[in-house]
Image: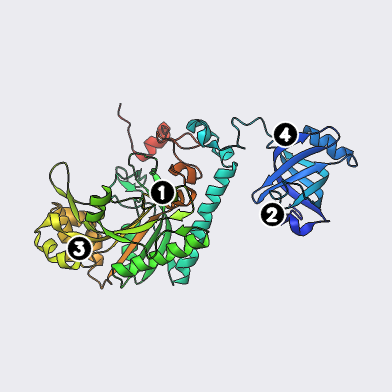
Amino acid sequence: MKNRIYIKDLKESVGKEVVIAGWVDVRRDQGKMVFFDMRDMTGKVQCVTLPVHPEAIIMAKEIRPEWVLEIKGLVKERNDKNAVQGGGVEIEVLNIEVLNKAETLPFDITTDTSEINEETRLSYRYLDLRSDRMQKNIRMRSEFVKRVREFLFSKMFTEIETPLLTESTPEGSRDFVVPSRLNPGKFYALPQSPQQYKQLLMVGGMEKYFQIARALRDEDLRADRGFEHTQVDVEMSFVEMEDVMNLIEEMMTTVVESMGFVIKQKPFPRITYKESMEKYGADKFDMRTEEEKKDKKILAYAWVVNFPFFEKTDEGKWTFTHNPFSMPIPEHIEFLMKGENIENILTTQYDLVCNGYESGGGSIRAHKPEILEATYKVMGYTKEEIEDRIGHMLEAFKYGVPSHGGIALGVERNLMNLTGETYLREVVSFPMTRGGKTAVMNAPKPLEEKQLKELGIKIGK
């Protein structure tokens, strides 16, 4: 649009003719004059049509909320009590061009939409996104990711994408699987995390990797958990626990303080898993006082360390608590190699908690094939099963692997802390419903018979 100016920049154009474009927020017809507020992605401004511009008044009497307009007008200073919202200016309208009309919306977007029925909100998510709160949340998400990126680039990290179509591997949750047309009866899995690929990047000599990674897990939906999530995925070579934790602590401090938040305690307190369970009854907790909880700008970070490596399944077998690729703490490596004292083996896992949520988790990785193999033996895998599951990792680890470790920070969980929201869907553009249905579009739904035939799939009754 030629010469369009954003509402936030109008203050610099007092006395000049400008063109703005956006949505009608509210409209007030006072007979001889019509007032209406225009909204774009940068803010709102009051527009007024005066009797000296009769054509503009005629058009202004027709417009309705959420119509999309292009306005040509004169920017004037405004000194009334509501002037601050419009940046101290208003627009005397010279011409109105209607770019698109809008029907009456199914719900009011000028209020807090969180109280509106979930199915209605998600069916019309593109309207819900126009509300002030959702605009703030989604733009804050973008700012958070941008600042994280800038910090990691400043520390010599390389941003690298890893595949979305991969192999099904045991990582703690059910996989979403994708049938292969070229290989009938065989399936890809969508990644629960880029765990193995980022470790292989360390084998590849990348040393400092990060990715704003999409991860998919077929697990039960909760207020703070969805089928899809985004994580700040980080891996580093030649590091110990302290190196990773110190880097991430510096990153989070730099990012959130630059966004106007206050950290309750620096450096972040460190508490063992055992102490956490004894004091809070959980490995994620909220250290804020009741008074501090009322201030959405206060963030109480802490590290939880010294997690048990293994736990018993319902069948009485051993399984990993976090990640099978982790390294035991140095003094427990011998226990693992001998398969002894399993219940007491601690791992180099570190979780970052904040305001009652797990914000991130990582570990130092087993970088020697015999240690990784020993972990799978403890879990009851035969040599053949180990080869089938992680043979590619064991092979890679034969060729000179640096010590390495990393972390994954959930973008949604961190945004819930920053916004004060209690539901993941409030910080995601197009989230799932509680029943696993997509917003706006109709999925999941049956495939056409032609598609099933191409994939060699038959649906049982």
Kindly indicate the quadrant of the structure image that contains residue 179: top left
> First in sequence: mark 4 or mark 2?
2
Q: Amino acid at mark 2?
A: Lys
Which residue lies at the image location 40% right of the left edge and 33% below the top edge? 435
Q: CA distance from mark 4 to mark 2?
A: 23 Å
Q: Which residue is mark 2?
A: 8
Q: Are marks 3 and 4 in contact (CB under 8 Å)?
A: no
Residue 243 image point, x, y percent:
33, 70
Q: Amino acid at mark 1?
A: His
Q: Are marks 3 and 2 in contact (CB under 8 Å)?
A: no
Residue 167 image point, x, y percent:
30, 52
Q: Nearer the viewer, mark 2 or mark 1?
A: 2
Kindly indicate the quadrant of the structure image that contains residue 130: top right
Which residue lies at the image location 83% right of the left edge and 56% below the top edge? 15
Q: Which residue is mark 3?
A: 328
- Tell me the crowding category of disc 2: few under 14, some 14 to 19, or many 20 or more residues within 10 angstroms, Cα based: some
> First in sequence: mark 3 or mark 1?
1
Q: Could you tell me how many numbered marks the image carries?
A: 4
Instruction: Give 110 or 363, whichever is nearer the viewer.
Output: 110
Task: Label 2: state its secondary structure.
Answer: helix
Against 199, residue 172 (above or below) is above
Q: Which residue is mark 4?
A: 64
Observer able to see residue 383? no
Q: Are marks 1 and 4 in contact (CB under 8 Å)?
A: no
Numbered label attached to residue 229: 1
